[in-house]
Image (cartoon, helix red, strand yellow):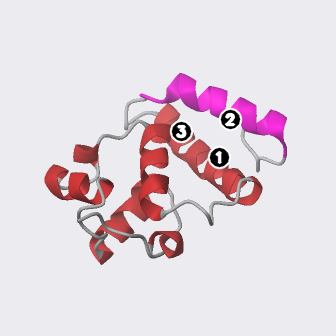
Amino acid sequence: MWYLIENEVDYKKALDRFEEIRHADRASLEHKEKMLLVTLISNYETEVFPVEDIDPIEMIKIRMEDFGFKPSQLGNKSSVSKVLNYKRPLTLTMIRNFSKILRIPSGFLVQEYELKQ
């Protein structure tokens, strides 16, 4: 049974369990447990590891890696790729989707960042 993560020991246990059930079938109880762990881990990381200095695109990349997502799983592969390569700004729809899928607060995703020419 899971509770709020309050310390490093709980955090490590949650990360270890997440890795064990990372690829659980969507129809399974393990998938529900995985999604709960995503929320608990994200909440703990937000409190313990402030992310104000990381730009939104880097945070998206980090969370994609954390949860094992590929660009094609986040929307139109071409559009997502352009965003991840700083060629295109995030749209409101992308912000909503990324926030929901990657468990990133939408307020964080609206921060300004520079595009590459």
Q: Which residue in the rendered view is the most extreme toward the top?
A: 20
User: Residue 102: x, y in percent?
Assistant: 45, 53
Labels 2, 3: front one: 2
Q: Is residue 46 left or right of residue 78?
A: right
How would you classify the magenta stretch by its main secondary structure? helix
Disc marking residue 14: 2
Q: Amino acid at mark 3?
A: Lys
Residue at position x 31%, y 54% in the image: 84
Q: For the magenta stretch, what is the residue range?
A: 7-23
User: Residue 79: x, y in percent?
Assistant: 18, 59
Q: For mark 2, give the secondary structure.
A: helix
- C-alpha gap between disc 1 and disc 3: 10 Å
Q: Is residue 1 above or below residue 84?
A: above
Q: Amino acid at mark 2?
A: Ala
Q: Earlier in the sequence, mark 2 or mark 1?
A: 2
**Looking at the rendering, in which quadrant would you find the N terminus?**
top right
Tag 2 and tag 1, C-beta contact below 8 Å: yes
Instruction: From the image, tell me which residue sits under label 1.
Output: 41
Residue at position x 51%, y 61% in the image: 104
Check disc 2: other Cα within 10 Å, few if <14, some if 14-19, many if 20+: many
**Looking at the rendering, in which quadrant would you find the C terminus?**
bottom left
